[in-house]
Image: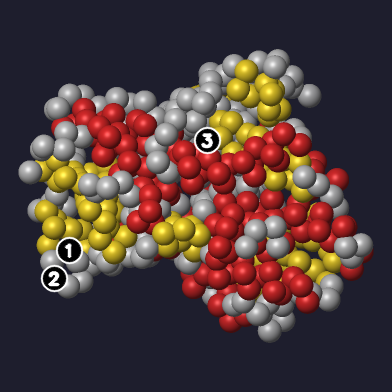
Amino acid sequence: MPQKKIGTYTVDVDDEGFLTNSAQWNKDIAAVIAKEEGIAELTPAHWKVIEFMQKDFKENGAVPTIRKLNKMGVISTKELYEIFPGGPAKKAAKIAGLTKPAGCV
Amino acid sequence: MKKVIILGAGTGGTVMANRLHKRLDKKDWSITVIDKDNVHYYQPGFLFIPFGFYTGDQITKEKSKFIPKGVEFIVSEVERINPQNNLVLLPDGKKIPYDFLIMATGAEIAPAETPGMLDGWRESVFDFYTLEGSTALHEKLKTFKGGTIAIHINEMPIKCPVAPLEFAFFCDWCLRRKKRRQDVSLVYVTPLSGAFTKPVAAKRLGALLEEREIKTVTDFSAERVDVAHKKLISYDNREVPFDLLVTVPTNMGSELIERSGMGDELRYVPTDPHTLRSKQFENIFVIGDATNLTSSKAGSVVHFQSEILADNILRAIEKRPLAADFDGHANCFVETGRRRGILIDFNYNQEPLPGRFPFPVIGPLPLLKPSRLNHIGKLAFRWIYWNRLLKARSIPFIPARMSMAGKKIPEQS
């Protein structure tokens, strides 16, 4: 399994850089991944999304969809695209230390 | 007397009625199928209607004709499922108790989910996932003067994720045959990052789009349709202009699932991916498009699921452990125009690969490569559907679980 050095931490990742063990995640790691994804600073709006995703993942075993974030009143889809530009579901999941969102086969 | 209720008499419900009728002991068990209407569409046929290849009556039959004698068939809306008390509630107040429930309620298009889409509905914006839509589109295409046709997927998952590709290939082919291709530009607009969900097939199908001079716009998540200015607008503020929009709107499960509080945000029922049992209720099973599984929403998938589901219902009745046998197997013919087609065969873990099907070397069907035989296979499938698949008769050489025989893993380039 590939590993990646993030700051002073070494984490297990998949081919696309998603953490494979969410227990290795912390807020410093999130900030570094965010920078790699072109997000200079994680604001409270980002954290609201990240924290919901982590909680929902824990409860349901899957990364919540953009539609679910919208429906549960976490964030509107428009705003989500603004704060996680270019593929928000994947980007937010990556920063949150979750697996790649399951697409259809 | 114990009862199995099957909700929905589409592909999944009909196959299950036939399978269980053969396998359940008639002394102890009765089967009831409930559907809101009595019209069974051969849904893969919708694609052929806009181009005049099929007419509506070739793909329409009565649902009741495929329900075996001895199975009760009720044509009625269902008000609600009450899974806590094992009841199905009808609008006339009737309550039908069940021992086991099979949900085969399918998926449907939901154009109202996208602001503006209904403004030009069946005037400049068309679907081809309903008989009404594809028939209206047939009329529209006859008089279309030229300009840009945008072929659009609004949101995944959709039924038959290859159908919009097939539509694009048919469009190109028909325009070329009529020597009008130069008057029309074709744009394929998708929320995916490529032509298909998986890399090898995406590359091959993407190359075909390019070869046919169909422009591709990827990662496009539509926020709204501006019919007055004839453009699609994405959440990240990109625009695709069109003269004619052929869209696959957001697909959602039945409203009944929402009314019963049993679905996710797209009204699909959380289902165990391998046993096909509801994640919430032990005596409820789910088949086909109604599930929240990542397997394709396609008829072949339903056929494969039905074998495993019938086994599991018998196991559940006998209080034996369920078999976790469903592997996400799908097997789809993809029309590429010019009387040729591609065949793809894949499952949860194995993406579509090139090779031969069902046997190595001798095939006879080539995988992931346009061929005449695959086209003939697709056309023959309509007969197979009505005469074998719905009646749960076996289809030779195509087992429920995917086989790697004949598949070739392409070398990394």
Callout in the foreground (3, 2): 2
Judging by the rendered image, the residue that carries numbered circle 1 is B89
Judging by the rendered image, the residue that carries numbered circle 2 is B93
Across and down, in percent, residue B189 comes to 69, 58
B188 and B407: which is toward the camera? B407
Across and down, in percent, residue A99 comes to 47, 36
Whether labels 1 and 2 belong to a single chain: the reply is: yes
Callout 1: few (<14), some (14-19), or many (20+) C-alpha neighbours within 10 Å? some
Mark 1 and mark 2: span between their CA atoms?
A: 7 Å
Residue B259 placement: quadrant = bottom left
B148 and B397: which is toward the camera? B397
- Which amino acid type is shown beneath numbered disc 2? Gly
Q: Which mark is residue B404?
A: none
Residue that protrudes farthest toward the front in the picture: B69
Asked if residue B217 shows in the view, the reply is no
Provide the chain ID for the residue under circle 3: B
Which of the two labelled residues, at mark 1 and mark 3, occupies the earlier sequence position?
Answer: 1
**Residue drawn at (37%, 32%) of the image:** B307
Q: Are marks 1 and 2 in contact (CB under 8 Å)?
A: yes
